[in-house]
Image: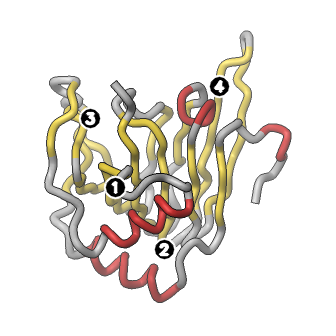
Amino acid sequence: MFADESARPDGLHYQPDFISAQEEAALIGHIRALPLAPFQFGIYEGKRRVVFFGSRYDFTHQRLEAAEELPAWLVPLAGRVERFAALPSGSIKHALCTEYDVGAGIGWHRDKKHFDQVFGLSLASACKFRFRRKAGNKWERFTLNAQPRSLYVMTGASRHVWEHSIPPVETPRYSITFRTMAQA
């Protein structure tokens, strides 16, 4: 699960086999049927393809914008994540479905301040989910090997202090990221 538990960021939780192989296949089928488009980061276009639900962050205008509501097939899974995290029903207001082709990854970042808790469901293949934070003149690092069908949860320091990234994947991968909204 975690290579070195002492280095694990506070607030990072991991649940292997959160869904079954049959549920995974159905979710991948739903994602493949979506109108996936390259991720837009201002004027740059990422290699991964995405669809946002509930809200999306516009990097050009640096603001949160409304997006299509969570589709019916995604609502029960959001509820399951809420129950797992002991959140009130309806707490998850945002979902991001992502397709990573071979060679696609995500650079170092923290999720936007508009969001609070982050829940990621890894599908189709494993990935190295990397974390880092500045420690003096060096970086403190941690890697979670996120397996297919697993759920990771980022709260507290893992969400707000540590940066995270995914290096380019070697095999196609999908993910569903759920987020709660930050309190104003």
- How many angstroms separate mark 1 from mark 3 (CA)? 28 Å
What residue would you read off at disc 1?
A: 90
Camera-near label (1 vs 4) is: 1
Which structural element holds mark 2? loop
Q: Which residue lies furthest to the top in this view?
A: 136
The residue identified by callout 3 is 41
Q: In this view, does 105 lie to the left or right of 156?
A: left
Q: Earlier along the polypeptide chain: callout 2 or callout 3?
A: 3
Q: Which residue is drawn at 21% across and 75% down?
A: 33
Which label was assigned to residue 184? none
Query: Residue under circle 4?
Result: 133
Location of mark 2 (residue): 124
Tag 4 or tag 3, which sits nearer the N-term? Answer: 3
Counting residues from the N terminus, which is met first, the one under dot 2 or under dot 4?
A: 2
Measuring from the top left, give residue 58's x and y in whole percent.
20, 33
Q: Is residue 163 above or below residue 145?
A: above
State the separation of the CA atoms marked 2 and 3.
25 Å
**First in residue order: circle 1 vs circle 4:** 1
Could you tell me the amino acid type at mark 3? Phe
Mark toward the start of the polypeptide (1 vs 3): 3
**Residue 142: percent from the left, percent from the top?**
72, 40
